[in-house]
Amino acid sequence: MSLVLYADPVFADHQMPAGHPECPARNAAAVSALAASPLIARREGASPGEVADVERIHDPDYVAAIEALAEAGGGSLDPDTYVSPRSYAVALDAIGTAVAATEAALAAEGDDPARRAFAAVRPPGHHARPAKGMGFCLFNNVAVAAARARAVHGLDRVCVVDFDVHHGNGTQDAFYRDGGVHFVSIHGRGYYPGTGADDETGEGPGAGTTWNRALPAKTQPPQYQDTFRAAMDSVLAYEPQLILVSAGFDAYIDDPLGNLNLEEEHFHWIGAELRQAADAVCEGRLVALLEGGYDLEQLGNLVAAFVGGVAGS
Ligand SMILES: [Zn+2]
């Protein structure tokens, strides 16, 4: 078993102020442990993104404002979230790469390894709301990929599973009233950005299609795994035609921005659970996009463990 890795040095061109945790070095760290991995069937570079895809999720005025800010030399959207001169172009590359990985997964026939993918993109996306970048995120990569899968490929049911330790508020906002995307998030309770209470479950046509579990700080792995199994039950019940994953590695025990207690082996376990769910309901079609994860020394090992689980090693 194997999968396709989407990685490109261009994702390091989104620059941040010195000392910022979401630093360009994360890009190389995330893929370093996969360099010679037999689990990687193929490695693909970045693909250019289309503004029309971005605008399925984001307000055109917001997209134009990010472009203008980058062209003007950059600046900050809030105390955490920065735009550098190349950030607009790189954020579009992240969108294009998420879309390319999703298209390849949907098109995969037979034993084509593209059915499963991991994309080490920057900037991350899951906090980006339709008209507001925040939490290190400019454009919501996973939401754009989900929206395109529905609009262009006619999918009726897409699942987004978010295991970053922070709640994927931007993704939730994009689909809160949309029954065609089931958003599932497990995250730390009371962490940034503060949303994602268990009783946030969707509204209108989306009622019941948002599933949140906010875990207290220092939750131990067995309790985390019980919660993750419940998340997978929710995914299976929805019967998605595609599973997209916001893969954040900041629930790691030593992550500087998290306070849950997962270790390397648990990220392998998470990957395996997701693979089994995708095998059960959507012919294995699963695309994981890098979100957070800030322990630079361990990030590569955590990604490699997760990829091993997804690949079935
Ligand atoms: Zn995070």
Image (cartoon, rainbow, N blue to C red):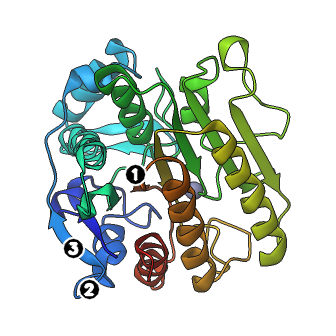
Q: Position of residue 266 (x, y in %)?
A: 63, 78
Quadrant of the rendered image containing residue 264:
bottom right
Instruction: Determine contact: label 1, label 2, CB under 8 Å.
Output: no
Other residues around mark 2 within 10 Å, as few (<14) / some (14–19) / many (≥20)? few
- Which residue appears at 45% of the width and 44% of the height? 81
For label 2, the residue is 38
Residue at the spot x=73%, y=17% of the render? Answer: 203
Indicate which quadrant contains ligand 1: bottom right
Numbered tag placed on residue 41 in the rendering: 3
Q: Amino acid at mark 3?
A: Ala
SS of the residue at dot 1?
Answer: loop
Q: Amino acid at mark 1?
A: Arg
* Mark 3 surroundings: few (<14), some (14-19) or many (≥20) residues within 10 A: some
Q: What separation in Å lies between label 3 and label 2 (alpha carbons)?
A: 7 Å
SS of the residue at dot 3?
A: strand
Q: Which residue type carries mark 2?
A: Pro
Determine which quarter of the picture holds residue 258: bottom right
The location of residue 117, given as percent across then percent down, is 33, 60
- Circles 3 and 2: CB atoms closer than 8 Å: no
Cα distance between the residues tagged 1 and 3: 15 Å
Q: In this rendering, would 152 be left or right of 302?
A: left
Q: Which mark is residue 97?
A: none
The answer to which of 296 and 117 lies nearer the viewer is: 117
Residue 71 appears left or right of 65: left
Q: Answer with left or right where residue 39 lies relative to residue 41.
A: right
Which residue, given by chain and number where applicable, does mark 1 sit on?
A: 285
- Across and down, in percent, residue 36 comes to 22, 88
Q: Can the viewer see residue 139 in this picture?
A: no
Q: Please tell me whether mark 1 or mark 2 is closer to you in this view.
A: 1
Residue 245 is at least partly visible in this image: yes
